[in-house]
Image (spheres, rainbow, N blue to C red):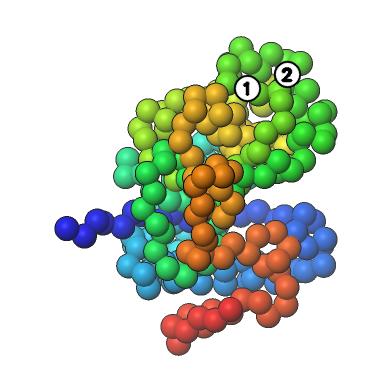
Amino acid sequence: MTQSLPTLCWSYKKLDQRSIVTGGTMSYEEYLDTNLKWYKLSIYKAKQLGYPTVMYCDDHLLEYWQSFEYLDEVHLVPIEFAEWYWDSYKFYALYIRDDFPIAMDHDVILNTHFKNLDEKVLVDSFDEDRHLIWRNRKILNLYEDNGVMDIVPEWNKNPQPLACSGVIQIKDKGVKDLFFKRYLDLYQFMLDHGIDPHWGTGIGGEALLSFMTNFYGWSTAALNQCIVPEKKYENDTYTHYFGHWKYRPGIVEFDYEKKKSAL
């Protein structure tokens, strides 16, 4: 019996992060155009492989996504769901669905199908320098000095690798339910204590998930960089064009009308 493919979810929120990823060298129109090409290429490649494809978005480009023929579903995200976290729509897809989808960044381009792994939590990679929080204790102190462990007992003060959620799947209902209880509590904690959401986003999602997997010993797989030495997952599945990389001139093209794509 052929196993059905998991649903793949993308998320779009109107953001302008040019100062972070391009140093302000692009116009907003160029920046948006480049991002949309990545989205379309990522979704198109997944659809070529037979995956169900879903978009979770705001109303900025709702009709645009509804008209993109390689999407099977398009959903509006409630504005009140962790609205100040810039990646909240990605996590909303994991939160709201019961079919354990894989949430993907728009700059993740599939080459072949994801491997069917048994671990409860799958992420893109683990990295000790993620968000630089271990080298900038001021960020963590804002949480710890205000009693974060009262609401997140899994909090870890010691340096550890943190997840990159460029690709993320939570494959266990108990894990999902407990994680999102902490996720929403920690979001409210950030608001209550006036913590900058720029830093709070990484703490509230990727760092929190890392703390909890470490605390409970949930099984994990890092698809790009496995931190369990005896388990190697060679990544020929996809390429993640993260950060500045994806904004190099001419790196991505998508001709929607002719249904052709190229990197």
Image point (77%, 40%), residue name: 132
Of the pair 137 and 258, the residue shown nearer to us? 137
Q: Is residue 18 left or right of residue 180?
A: right
- Amino acid on which disc 1 is placed: Trp
Residue extending farthest to the left is 1
Image point (36%, 53%), residue name: 116
Q: Which residue is mark 2?
A: 144
Q: Position of residue 187 (x, y in %)?
A: 60, 28
Image point (50%, 66%), residue name: 236
Quadrant for the N terminus in the image:
bottom left
Distance, label 2 to label 1, CA atoms, is 9 Å
Quadrant for the C terminus in the image:
bottom right
Which picture quadrant has residue 67? bottom left
> Circle 2 — which element?
helix
Q: Position of residue 139 (x, y in %)?
A: 78, 30
Of the pair 37 and 220, the residue shown nearer to us? 220
Q: Position of residue 100 (x, y in %)?
A: 36, 44
**Badge 2 density bin: few <14, some 14–19, many ≥20, Cα 10 Å:** some
Q: Position of residue 10 (x, y in %)?
A: 48, 56
Q: Which residue is mark 1?
A: 155
> Circle 1 — which element?
loop
Q: Is residue 27 left or right of residue 224?
A: right
Q: Work out whether mark 2 precedes mark 1 in sequence or the reverse, and give the earlier one.
A: 2
The reply to whether discs 2 and 1 touch (Cβ–Cβ < 8 Å) is yes
Q: Is residue 195 visible?
A: no
Which picture quadrant has residue 25? bottom right
